[in-house]
Image: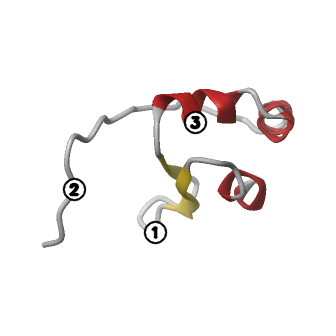
């Protein structure tokens, strides 16, 4: 999933993380160049395969957030 997503046009970042304070919690971090690139990602075959594979896991909760950033600068 990571490799295929990172190869998509418009993908700036795609990462999975295990939360070090709650090892049963996983986080997915993504950055997309545009809304169109994100929507194209949702329509890919690897995303459909990922959704299907996730049915085999016991997900107790999920929180999906989308942030729109209008500027980025180095600190």
x then y, percent, for residue 31: 46, 49
Give residue 12's mark. none
Rendered residue at 57%/36% (across/down) = 37
Label 1 sits on a secondary structure element that is loop
| Res. 49 image quadrant | top right
Mark 2 and mark 1: Cα distance apart in space? 27 Å
- CA gap between label 2 and label 3 equals 19 Å
Residue corresponding to mark 1: 20
Q: Position of residue 59 (x, y in %)?
A: 65, 34
In the displayed structure, 18 sits above or below 61; it is below
Residue at 84 percent across and 36 percent down: it is: 56
Residue 60 visible in the displayed image: yes
Picture layout, residue 38 above or below residue 3? above
Label 1 crowd (10 A; few <14 / some 14-19 / many >=20):
few
On the question of residue 26 being in view, the answer is no
Question: What secondary structure is found at the residue carrying circle 2?
Answer: loop
Q: Secondary structure at mark 3?
A: helix
Q: CA distance from mark 3 to mark 1?
A: 30 Å
Return the residue at label 2. 72
Residue at which label 3 appears? 37
User: For the point 46% across and 36% down, which residue is it?
Assistant: 34
């Amino acid at each position: 999933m990571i490799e295929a997503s990172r190869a998509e046009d418009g993908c700036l970042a795609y990462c999975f993380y295990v939360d070090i304070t709650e090892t049963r919690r996983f986080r997915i971090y993504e950055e997309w160049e545009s809304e169109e690139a994100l929507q194209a990602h949702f329509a890919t075959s690897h995303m459909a395969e990922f959704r299907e594979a996730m049915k085999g896991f016991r997900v107790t909760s999920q929180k999906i957030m989308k942030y729109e950033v209008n500027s980025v600068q180095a600190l």
